[in-house]
Amino acid sequence: MARLEPANVEIAHEIISRYPRPKSALIPLLHLAQEQDGWVSDEAMVHIAELVGCTPAEVIGTCSFYEMFKREPVGRYLVNVCTNIACQLLGAEDLLHHAERTLGVRAGTTTPDGLFTVEDVECIAACTEAPCLTVNYRYFYKVGPSDFDAIIADLRAGRRPTRCAAEPGEDGEIPAHGTLHRVRQSIPGDRRAGNADPDTAGEPAWLGAGGAS
Amino acid sequence: MSDIETPVTVRITVDGQPVDARPGELVIDAAERAGVYIPRFCYHPRMKPVGMCRMCLVEIDAGRGAALQPSCMIPVSPDMTVVTDSERTRKAQEGVLEFLLINHPLDCPVCDKGGECPLQDQTVAYGPGESRFVEEKRHYEKPIPISGLVQLDRERCILCDRCTRFAKDVAGDPLIHFQGRGSSTEVNTFPDEPFSSYFSGNTVQICPVGALTASSYRFRARPWDLEETSSTCRTCSVGCSVTVQSSRNEVLRQNGVDNDAVNWGWLCDRGRFDMESGRSDVRLTDPLVGGTTARWSDALGAAVAAIRATIEAHGPSSVALLGGARLTNEAAYAWARLAKGVIGTDDVDCQLGDGLPADLVLGLPRATIADACTPKGTIVLVGPDVKEELPVLYLRLRHAVVEDGATLVELGHGRTGLSRYAARTSYAHPGGDLVERARLVAKDLDESGPITVVFGRTSLAEDPAVLAEVAAIFLAKGARFLPALRRGNVFGALDAGLAPGLLPGRRLLDDAGPATAVWGSTPAAIGRDATAILTAAAAGEVKVLLLVGADPVADGPDRALAETALERATVIAVDTFLTESGTRADVVLPAAGPSEVDGTVTNLEGRVQRVNRKVTPPGTARPDWMIAVELADRLGVEFPQDPDALLAELGAVADGYADVASALDRNPDGVLVTGACPLPATPTARRAPAPSGSTLRLVLTDSLYDAATQTAQSPSLAPLAPGTVARLNPADASALRVEAGTVVSLASARGAVDLPVVVDDGVPAGAVAVAANQPDCQVNRLLDATWPVTDVRLEVRR
């Protein structure tokens, strides 16, 4: 719940070095903070501001624009139930109510054990599989109340939930909220092509004469 | 851009009328110059356009057919046709206003902006008249303070991006930002990090709705109850153009006016809000003699008796005058003539030992702000922290560097507000290698463009003679100088002759010119400067000390010296408040404050501008010029009897001020007074002793909010004084085993003060930086004005 840990500061410096301007690293660094804590705390935003040399107000300006950066703690599993029209017609509201009832929380809040946060969301682009939900942005299709209970039971038991429609190549693992990847991209300095200085680089061709004035 | 620089014009058509626009000019500006006002909220002529509000949509045809386009984003092009009054434009404007008003509360009757609100006015002029929106509006907690000075009402905000653009692009303090998205977008600060910009008040002025209001003005008046007059801010020597607004004889608000040569419409918060001090109920309202209220005739009589008796017994140089840098030019001239022409003393100084030698300031070739800000030019900063002392000059210099490709080189004793914009910084150890560093910097200067030196005291704890050597180095490079002295009208006072060896019109005493004829006589010998005057008073040589708006005890660099001097001499103080020095005075004469007198002032460029009276002074307080005229009268010399006549007489004795009054009528933005006195020979600075290992060298800095009377007496500003800390280089902090927050004692041979430590890598090693004149600490106890540098010993308080 705090500033970036020393190991993450190392990673942050590598991320910042990928960009010609440090402030361009804001979004990857916000992801890094969210990966560390599961959410983006004020302290983390202050730390990011120090790392990229801008004000915390600028960091929160970027952070608050994106729904997927959580500025308050969320559960280990973020359950997003779609209530948009296709899902709604096929029972999404019943599903959301079922989720609220069985988890004992209102949409938008977290179970006392810190495991589940339920949210209702707008269309998540799986209308053909309605009603659908995501857990930490992993899809579950054609979810009925009993499917929901099974997913929750699996997650509580530390099992990989039986996916209604697992994507090819996925193993069904659902890591904690905020986790970005199993293998972090790392481009050591000697392998990078180097950053062009945007102040001295020439004008892009598409901005040149004949383009928009 | 003036027409001379860009003779080529672009012919466009606005509402059927041919208009000659400037190349690159925005349609909204070209139309406005041609008399067609296009409504707008987000567009501001001193900021880059963003096209946020869509209010300025008009039909523009640039050859591909007419389309609604935001006129603040489109530069003119040849044969462009603009239609601002078509049915389509009208429908667009109605639609934009209807949308803007969806979430805007209709609380105009209780809104401070009501009556002067662009949203209100443009809704009447261009709006649909009726809304179709019947749903509940968005609600927020309101108002929330985003700083001690500014309150934010997010419900009223129309997200025009003016305040946030100002904070980021103009002030360089992006402490407010858009947050959230879509219909829940709001302007706000980071939690618990206030909008503590020195320029926050400008956002209130440019807010096109009542979303940002100033704590000092909220609910104090309705715009239609205000009377206003144009004037010039006298808080520092930049001389920003302002409009002073009052109701029922109280100044309630001061707003910036766009003066192209000076402030571009901006003000700093100190200049904007320190008018609050004018309505303080501890203003001096009646004369005091021996600490008790007296009638004016008795107080003036006592003052004159003391002066006359002293002159007769000990000669004119037993009378000395300190101050005058806060007066109008007319008053400064009247006091200069009183001291030098009537009393006959040259022991006169408008600076308190914290400025620069007068003949150096007036002898160096002067630059204007515009000269300093020439695109692609070079600015050399040798002086105080401009952001702290001359904030609007900071805005102009910052703009020159960030937007216009000027190069900033900084020489000094540590990081300042401008350092982050400097291409090169060179921090010298105080009393050390400033001159050598200046040589190195000068060697590498780009001489293809103009070089301007912003020139002032780098530290109040260091002998200014070293700066004369620095000036000579840059003078040899063909540089011009923008002197950075801080007191309001110090340049007007210098031009009026309120300095030793000087006569009005930047003339030296031995080249008296017309002053001798008008005055009858001028002092026989060059007098003493402030430090020497106070030393002489402490030694009993100066018997009568006139303090004209000066407080050498609190505001001077050497408190102990000033205290002794004021104890021994008979002190006659003229001021708006009873200052620390005033409480030690034998006669105190209450003076009118900044918005209570008519006259002119001269800024750091030498630009003369008018100040105008808006309210009457409290009680029996009189304008400073009138007090000088009265004293002269009682000493048997008749002076001109009003500011206009005094200005005319100043014009008669000072070449640059001849015809200034009529020139001001033609140029409301001010009249530059040029001319220089002969440059003095460069003195050799006293060698500072080599730093010893066990002491730190003191760097005395200034901060915008301090214990200066007008700031301390303004309820909005007084709490903003940061207090005093001892800023140490990390290397020194670890060597001395102190950390941030440790309370240490700084002791010089003169005195000691206790301060908490702040570790700051912007302070050079071996130095300790301390802000002067803060309300909680008398740092000037440490200084002896005759020392070339001040060394202090640091001890940890247990």
Image: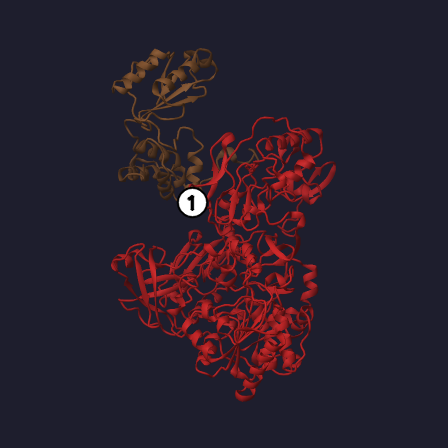
Relative to residue A118, is residue B602 depicted above or below?
below
Q: What's the colour of chain B in the image? A: red
x and y, in percent, of residue B481 in the image: 51, 64
Residue type, numbered disc 1: Glu
Disc tally is 1
x and y, in percent, of residue B582 in the image: 51, 71
Relative to residue B187, is residue B643 depicted above or below?
below
Circle 1 — which element? loop
x and y, in percent, of residue B534 in the image: 46, 77
In this view, the residue in front, B153 or A205, is: B153
Which picture quadrant has residue B276?
bottom right
Which picture quadrant has residue B515?
bottom right
- Residue tagged by mark 1? B193
Q: Residues within 10 Å of mark 1 (few under 14, many from 20)?
A: some
Can you say which quadrant of the picture contains the C terminus of chain A?
A: top right
**Chain letter, colour brown in render:** A
Residue pictured at 67% horizontal, 76% vertical: B639
Does residue B668 appear in this view? yes
Which residue in the rendered view is the most extreme toward the bottom? B313
Q: Chain of mark 1?
A: B
Does residue B63 appear in this view? no
In this view, the residue in front, B352 or B47, is: B352
Question: Does B261 sit left or right of A19 as displayed?
Answer: right
Which residue in the rendered view is the most extreme toward the front? B292
In this view, the residue in front, B174 or B301, is: B301
Question: Does B250 sit left or right of A191 as displayed?
Answer: right
Which residue in the rendered view is the most extreme toward the right? B16
Which picture quadrant has residue B286?
bottom right
Question: Does B741 sit left or right of B113 as displayed?
Answer: left
Residue pictured at 30% horizontal, 14% vertical: A150
